[in-house]
Image (cartoon, coloured by chain):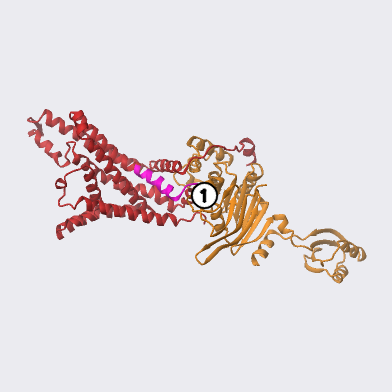
Chain colours: A red, B orange
């Protein structure tokens, strides 16, 4: 020790300290670094890229086929197939640069996203509780909400990386495949809708992720809860709607509520939303708002209960 | 000299329970040991000093900063920037390397990213973790973990270090190294250290002053030497020769015998009016040689047990 002491003198630091908001961004950056140290995170990112590239190239393919080969036939396994039959395959995805294109993209991306968030929640937040890292963060000159904000920023980045950013790229692509000046000029509201949809997803999913991670902390229970929320509840909702003939039962499907909120941001016609029947947009907003408020209240209770000095 | 910590009638209640009762203290800068059994109020005092909880009544300051106010206020953040806190709990962030961990702590204290990284390298080198700085913190040994925790407390070069059981879980060599390091930070780099521990030997090795707490009150405060010397009128006399007559003569002069180790060392309590010459006069009379005459100061352990038992 003494030898090091003589070789490496302790040097004072006399800089100007920045505020707690800066600390929250540093916390977010460190959290993302931590997450992408795991190969599972890269695998899930690759999977989400597959979904994006499928939509990206399929959108291009549909336009190309429609414009250039509209009346032609191509030979498939030795049989002539009308190209119109090929485009029919993509019809449920509505790859035509409308509100449903982006709504569908985010809907399908959601399957990867919920798994990713279950994993990210346990790595970024759950492990802080289970490994006792919280005193490290909370003994610093930041508030408890800055800690939550830092973690939420990291998770928000992830959500937007998987949904909003690629959806905007699809919007740009749709414009380039059409008369771009007309498309961008006429459909700028769609861009705004995508951003709003992204915002709704960001706020809701971030808070649910952080709240469930604080609650259960570990990956497997987190995955089970998310399976319950995003797989079992939708199945239950569908069967209840069919059995009791009341479309309001679909409100227990959280992902569907987010989809409805998103489509209302994209100004889609509610009659064209699949599956039918669907509850009203305002009902979906109300349920989503209630979920968000509950998460905030729960987080407030849990974060304030943390002991920094044992 | 500006006091390091000044508390005026500080109390803290949790419902009906009084954790701290009317604490008044003025501690100068230096290395201060905070001793007390479980439930003495040490942790509550540390929380108040870090601005994590406000006192129920009373006022106080740490250097220039006033204590009090709600937890998440600018004043409390300024207060926490003055303090480097090393928690007793593991408080590491698994998945980060040593340098990332310390650098993140720097950024949470408000240091710009580049400076935090540079300073993390310097502090880790100073604490002899240079070779291990790119290893993940969860792979560190117990001693390395304690030093990494000290590094994160030191990264922003605070004037005050608040160490909660810094030698907890260390082997004897690691403990010695940690104590030397903490002492060097005080003596060579002018840091004030508030050292909370159960281990009296650690306080004796490092601290100039000690605060003894029990039942939410300060039971003793002062320099270690001062407190241990407060027991007036007690001596250790090492003598050579026939003791019986010497003892009888001293008893006749009002001396009480508190102990005899059987090897010529007597522990005695003298009357209020006493001259040490009397020892030598009786020794000469009864043919005994006095080899040493020392004040029988209390050990820190005796002092602690006596103070806490009050």
Provide the major secondary structure of the magenta segment: helix
Report the front residue among B251 and B115.
Answer: B115
**Which chain is mark 1 on?**
B
Q: Position of residue A226 (x, y in %)?
A: 30, 52
**Magenta stretch: includes residue B265:** no
Q: Judge whether residue A154 is colored magenta.
A: yes
Give the farthest residue toward the right: B285
Q: Against A64, is A103 above or below?
A: below
**Residue B216: horizontal and vertical position, in percent?**
59, 63
Magenta region, residue range: A140-156
Q: Indicate the secondary structure of the residue bearing disc 1.
A: helix
Residue nearest the observer in this picture, A205 or B205: A205
Question: Is residue A297 among the parts visible in the rendering?
Answer: yes
Name the residue: 53% across, 47% down: B80
Give the left or right position of residue A32, taking residue A310 as reference. Answer: left
Q: How many marks?
A: 1
Circle 1 residue: B76
Left-right relation of A136 to A163 = right
| Res. B197 image quadrant | bottom right
Answer whether residue B146 is visible to the viewer in this image: no
Tell me the quadrant of the picture where the N terminus of chain A can be found. Answer: top right
Residue A29: which quarter of the image? top left
Residue A157 point in image, percent of width and height: 35, 41
Crowd around label 1: few <14 · some 14–19 · many ≥20 (10 Å): many
Q: Judge left or right: residue B91 versus residue A117.
A: right
Nearer the observer, A123 or B5? B5
In the rendering, at what x and y percent does residue B280 appear? 89, 61
- In this view, A18 is above or below A70: below
């Amino acid at each position: 020790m003494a030898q090091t002491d003589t070789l490496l003198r302790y040097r004072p630091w006399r800089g100007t300290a920045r505020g707690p908001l800066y600390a929250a961004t540093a916390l977010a950056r460190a959290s993302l670094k931590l997450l992408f140290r795991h190969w599972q995170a890269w695998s899930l990112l690759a999977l989400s890229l597959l979904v994006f590239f499928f939509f990206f190239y399929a959108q291009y393919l549909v336009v190309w086929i429609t414009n250039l080969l509209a009346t032609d036939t191509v030979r498939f396994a030795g049989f002539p197939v009308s190209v119109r039959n090929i485009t029919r395959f993509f019809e449920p995805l509505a790859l035509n640069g409308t509100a449903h294109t982006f709504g569908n993209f985010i809907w399908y991306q959601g399957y990867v996203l919920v798994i990713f968030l279950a994993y990210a929640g346990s790595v970024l937040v759950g492990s802080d509780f289970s490994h006792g890292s919280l005193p490290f963060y909370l003994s610093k000159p930041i508030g408890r909400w800055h800690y939550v904000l830092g973690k939420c920023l990291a998770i928000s980045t992830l959500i937007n990386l998987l949904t909003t950013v690629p959806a905007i790229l699809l919007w740009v692509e749709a414009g380039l495949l059409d008369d771009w000046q007309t498309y961008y000029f006429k459909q700028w509201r769609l861009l705004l809708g995508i951003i709003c949809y992204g915002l709704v997803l960001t706020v809701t999913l971030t808070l649910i992720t952080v709240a469930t991670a604080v609650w259960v902390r570990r990956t497997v229970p987190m995955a089970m809860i998310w399976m319950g929320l995003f797989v079992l509840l939708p199945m239950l909702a569908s069967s209840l709607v069919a059995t009791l003939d009341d479309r309001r039962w679909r409100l227990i499907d959280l992902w569907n509520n987010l989809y409805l909120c998103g489509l209302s941001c994209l100004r889609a016609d509610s009659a064209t939303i699949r599956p039918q029947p669907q509850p009203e947009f305002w009902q979906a907003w109300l349920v989503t708002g209630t979920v968000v408020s509950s998460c905030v209240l729960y987080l407030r209770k849990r974060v304030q209960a943390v002991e920094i000095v044992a | 000299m500006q006091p390091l910590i000044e508390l005026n009638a500080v109390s803290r209640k949790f419902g009906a329970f009084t954790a701290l009762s009317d604490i008044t203290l003025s501690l100068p800068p230096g290395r201060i040991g905070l001793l007390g059994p479980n439930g003495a109020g040490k942790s509550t005092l540390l929380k108040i000093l870090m601005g994590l909880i406000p006192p129920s009544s009373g006022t106080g300051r740490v250097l220039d900063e006033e204590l009090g106010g709600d937890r998440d206020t600018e004043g409390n953040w300024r207060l926490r920037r003055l303090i480097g806190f090393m928690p007793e709990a593991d408080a590491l962030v698994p998945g980060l390397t040593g340098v990332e961990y310390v650098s993140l702590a720097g950024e949470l204290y408000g240091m710009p990213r580049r400076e935090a990284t540079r300073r993390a390298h310097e502090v880790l080198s100073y604490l002899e973790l240079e070779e291990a700085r790119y290893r993940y913190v969860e792979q560190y040994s117990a001693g390395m973990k304690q030093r990494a925790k000290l590094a994160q407390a030191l990264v922003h070069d605070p004037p005050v270090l608040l160490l909660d059981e810094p030698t907890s879980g260390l082997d004897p060599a690691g403990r010695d190294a940690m104590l030397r390091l903490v002492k060097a930070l005080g003596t060579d780099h002018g840091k004030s250290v508030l050292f909370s521990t159960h281990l009296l030997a650690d306080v004796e090795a490092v601290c100039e002053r000690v605060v003894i707490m029990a039942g939410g009150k300060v039971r003793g405060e002062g320099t270690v030497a001062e407190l241990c010397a407060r027991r007036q009128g007690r001596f250790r006399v090492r003598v050579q020769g026939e003791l019986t007559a010497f003892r009888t003569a001293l008893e006749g002069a009002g001396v009480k015998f508190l102990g005899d180790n059987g090897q010529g060392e007597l522990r005695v309590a003298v009357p209020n009016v006493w001259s040490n010459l009397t020892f030598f006069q009786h020794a000469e009379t009864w043919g005994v040689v006095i080899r040493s005459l020392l004040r029988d100061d209390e050990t820190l352990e005796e002092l602690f047990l006596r103070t806490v038992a009050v």
